[in-house]
Image (spheres, grey):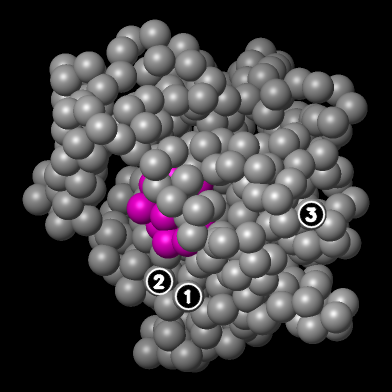
Amino acid sequence: MNNWQAWAALAVFAAAYVLIITEWVHRVAAALGGAALMLAIRATDDESAFFSTDSGIDWNVIFLLMGMMMIVGVLKRTGLFEYLAIWSVKRARAKPFRVMAMLVVITAAASALLDNVTTVLLVAPVTLLVCQRLRLKAAPYLIAEVLASNIGGIATLVGDPPNIIIASRGGLNFNDFLVHLAPLAVLLTGVLLVMCRLMFRRFFVYDEDRAAEVMALNEREAVHDHRLLAQGLAVLAVVIAGFVLHPVVHYAPSVVALLGAGLLVAISKVEVKDVLAEVEWPTLAFFAGLFIMVGALIETGVIETVSKALADATGGNPLGAVMLLLVASGVLSAVVDNIPYVATMAPITADLVHTVGEPYGVVLWWALALGADLGGNATAIGASANVVVLGIAERNRTPITFWTFTRYGAPVAAVTIAVSALYLWIRYFALAG
């Protein structure tokens, strides 16, 4: 990092980040403005920004979001989400914390099988309707769900995009993640529930009259287009199967989502313009700008410099390397999106694995995954699911500010990373020793 462009890129990113967190300008304007400046100072170029898989816009994420937003937009027209909202409230006896606990557990479990972005796209509309029915403030429920999605995503190879990168670089498979990280995901979901009970306690206001009204509803009456529902659920099932069978069929998640969206639009009678109107275009634009800015930091060597400094600081001590990688990844993934961070850090981690050797080398991959996935909970832009939920909340007139999210996300990130550190130490060092 010895050229002026690296320092200029760092300054642009810092300025854009300040604008995003202070909300002096809309976050989309800040991200796109920062991306434009990165191109203007030649910290990156059009080739790298738009076509590079390592330092440009991650079109797989963009088109995955677009395809799933279209599918969710069609399903919203069937009354499915109203049905699920009434059903979940009745199962929780309309008690606010029970409702949150149910949604958190469902979200965490679903995020282990789907990617966490897809999960929140499906769960968020249900949450908004539940809160509307019970006259509850939606923001705490949405925040709790996105935190749960990032925690649940650590359990499997397909749960969070960084896991796929780590698996590829480290030669790990689906069962490796399931055996080593799924137990921790269950534990951390329990930790999250306890923290939610404490953090959001003032929002758990029970309205007995409103609850009685909802309990008297028949959820079956909410579904008003059974044919479209059958078509939508069939397509959604095929899409989910495509996600889970990715190691076998080798179709990128974005391709699966777009094929599913195209098929659903083709077989249903919903107008294309109505389906496209459901897409969160500002959210996609924000992602594009953020990817270009982070890509410029990669191109100019800023992220590599930070990553190598982390590697040099470990001194070859296995426990020290694991803990430093875990904590540093958590901190950095709160600032930059965890996908490009892991893409940059993976080769350096591979060198560390070789240096540390067996039996501790593989633990470094779990430290990288946990730090990147859980650290993403700390801020509103730390993970893709966070940005998506904030976009949905804004569109539904329940905006969540950067600081509101961070007020709850940062403590959860800190506690879950601390618990993860204890888990790694006990399982791979204390008991192994």
Label 3 packing within 10 angstroms: few (<14), some (14-19), many (20+):
few
- Marks 3 and 2: in contact by CB < 8 Å? no
Asked if the stretch drawn in magenta spans residue 424, the answer is no
Q: For the residues carrying marks 3 and 1, which lies nearer the camera in this image? A: 3
Name the kind of residue labelled 1 in the image: Ala
| Residue 382 at x, y percent in the picture | 42, 53
Helix, strand or loop under label 3: loop
Dot placed on the residue nearer the N-terminal end, 2 or 3:
3
In the image, the segment drawn in magenta is 328-339
Query: What residue is disc 3 on?
Result: 357
**Looking at the image, is 214 positioned above or below residue 162?**
below
Is 207 situated left or right of 286 in this image? Answer: right
Quarter of the image where the C terminus is located: bottom right
Residue drawn at x 64%, y 16% as measured from the top left = 262
| Residue 322 at x, y percent in the picture | 64, 65
Query: What residue is disc 2 on?
Result: 410
